[in-house]
Image (spheres, helix red, strand yellow):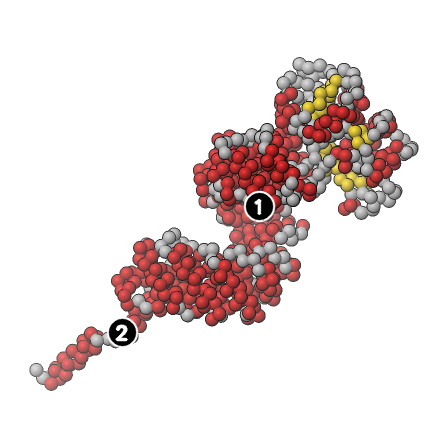
Amino acid sequence: MSGRRLASHGRSNWRLLLGAKQSPVCLQLKLQKRLSAADGDQALELFDKESRRFDTVHVLTAMRAVALSPPSRSPHTLGRLLNRAVSLMPELAGNDLAALAWSLASICTKEAGCGVECGARGLTAAVPRVAATLAPSELTVVAWALAKLSEPSDEAIAAIVRQARFRIGRFKCKDAVHLAWALSKMQARDMDFMQQLAGQTLDGISVLSRQDTGNAAWAFAKADVLCRPLMRSIRAKFLAESTDFNAQELASIVWAFAWLDAADEVLLQRFQSALLCRAPELNAGGLARVSWALASMGVAEGRLFQRLGTSAQRCMESFGGSELSTLAWAFAKSDALELDGCDPSLLLAIAKQAEERVANLNARDVDMIAWSLAKANAPMPSFIAKLATRAVCLAADFDAQGLANCAAAFALLSTEVPGLRSMLSQRSREQISSFSAQALCDLQWSFAFQSWADAALQEAIWTAPGWEERPRYVHDVQAGAVADCFKHLLLVALLQRLQATQGACEHGDESLLYVDTHAGAGMYQLQAAHAANIERLLTATPARMPACMASYLDCLRSFAGYPGSPAIALHFLQPMSRAVLFEAVGETYETLCHNLQFVGKRVDIICEDAYRGLPKMLMKPQRALVFVDPPYDLCFADNLNFKLVDQLQQHWPCSTVAIWYPIRDFARCQRVYRRIASLTLEPVLVCEFALSHNECQSDAVRTGMLLLRPPDLETRLHEVLPVLAKTLAISPKVFWDYSVFWLKPSDENGCALRYF
């Protein structure tokens, strides 16, 4: 062999020798280079073949590759990689832990199981150890990852907040938003620190992306932090770029302003315009949040709810229990199914999905769905029974408001399943000190309406801290008030006109039956403030006294005390007519019987809830005036009226129904108008009255009366209501107003429907 060939052969062998004895460092660098260029599946394949050679850097690199790739096709190998990553956590430095935390959280959003839960526990345990070494951006990443992965320990949350508070001035605006989002997601209730984060966010709001703007709005609303300068800046940014926000960003902002009650009319209109365009793009969570927000803000836009409902129908199978219950609540709360264009089958679709998943519904879901079905008057006996059974199983999970809602909803839906009564009673007594005044009223009513005698629960309600704060409309307190004078004057006008109009109901006679659903005590002693109202009425000398007002004043003068609606009605009823008076409160019933014992007319006084007792009387058609004057102290007060109107429409189609109501907010009045109009094909006359004690319109007492199938009263009301207002006014300068209009056109008088 020549020398040249020998030398060449020697160099080749030397290269082989060097390759066979590469140093561990070279091998690790080579592996790292391959991992850096690999996607998720390639990284997992490398780990599967050479897991013994993987050090900390390799594991972190492989985790990042998996996090940035589509879901893995090797779940077993991914599980092994996650376990290796978790085993390294106790030794990781802060920056490495932040990198691993990001990868874990990103993987958990697309991979079910595979050891993610174990990773969450390991991260939670490691955070208190390294929190002090983390830079603000790293601290934000770790907090974000914890919020994505699990419900971390209080110790981990406290460590993050403590370190972030020390460095609050070093947080960039974007990091402040992400940290606020994470803390809100983890339900960390540190209001002072969240206010600091809001201030830090405000300083850089102009450079935030639209996604981060939406996240900021959601985060601070979720934490119940109302930073008005920040919300004004978010408002301005949204108004300037509203068409550029995507569907989910829009949903977050709309929800946040609704939750914080911070939306003005301009913003509300822009929300509606944007949602009309983006509704088809919303996912299940976005649809639920937006629907809730609109219902909470009193929006009743038929076209918008129709689009939201259509979008929800398309993706109904993707709704979880929380989204289903929130969507049901929103559409029921807003009476959206009564709006033009809305598909009434939406609630049926929600109920169908909920019924398929009833075993997975939590207490909040059961509470909201039951409330929604009752509010929308959607009887679905089979599903409601399953819902009630599920409520019994979840007894320990209900809070006070949930118990009250369930009790009232199942009562209104006439639902009873084994164990429901005892569960509601026992759990309510255990939490009675947590019940609000409104919840106590609903709870008491539901047991009485179902005829569930429970002395122990009744005693607990009467002695509960919130009982004395309950909303009251007590007849003796309101006797002689402005609203009382208004409703009694209309009652006199109705009775006079009905009895002057002769006519028999089909299959009935021409005598008039007067029904008072909430009779009260019948006679009262006036309080000083209200006595002044009656004094002004009795001493008034208007230039032209309307006949029905003169009759009303003569009636007042004929009694030693102040007459309630039963006494006034009996004063005007003709001998051939009859009265039925309902009073549900035992003590008041006894007083009513005593006060009316000398009345020489046919009177039946019944100690029962009229909503339960009156339907028992609806056997044959009757010419009647049904006077509905409830206290409106129940969450389903309007629904009880709707249900009664529907029953009267079916069984007493000749009856006139007068429903008094307080005017508390515009949105509620609109809902009542729509529901009443949908129940009857007859014209509905609305009469509203307002009177203030000064020139300020906002201080006015506002009240109204719905008149179904009224006699010819419209002209008389236009005559008498201005006289009533001027007579009750304490000076000529005080504000007063009234309106009389039809909810539906009448073929007889040609009146047009009034729109607001």
Alpha carbon of mark 2 to alpha carbon of mark 1: how far?
A: 61 Å
The residue depicted at 63 percent of the width and 32 percent of the height is 640
* Label 2 secondary element: helix
Q: Position of residue 348 (x, y in %)?
A: 51, 35
Residue 720 shows which numbered tag?
Answer: none
Residue underneath mark 2: 24
Q: Position of residue 256 (x, y in %)?
A: 59, 53
The residue depicted at 53 percent of the width and 64 percent of the height is 161
Horizontal side of 586 relative to 451 (left or right) equals: right
Horizontal side of 230 relative to 278 (left or right) equals: right
Residue underneath mark 1: 292
Picture quarter with the N terminus? bottom left
Q: Disc 2, disc 1: CB below 8 Å?
A: no
Q: Which of the two labelled residues, at mark 2 and mark 1, occupies the earlier sequence position?
A: 2
Q: Residues within 10 Å of mark 1 (few under 14, many from 20)?
A: many
Mark 1 residue type = Trp
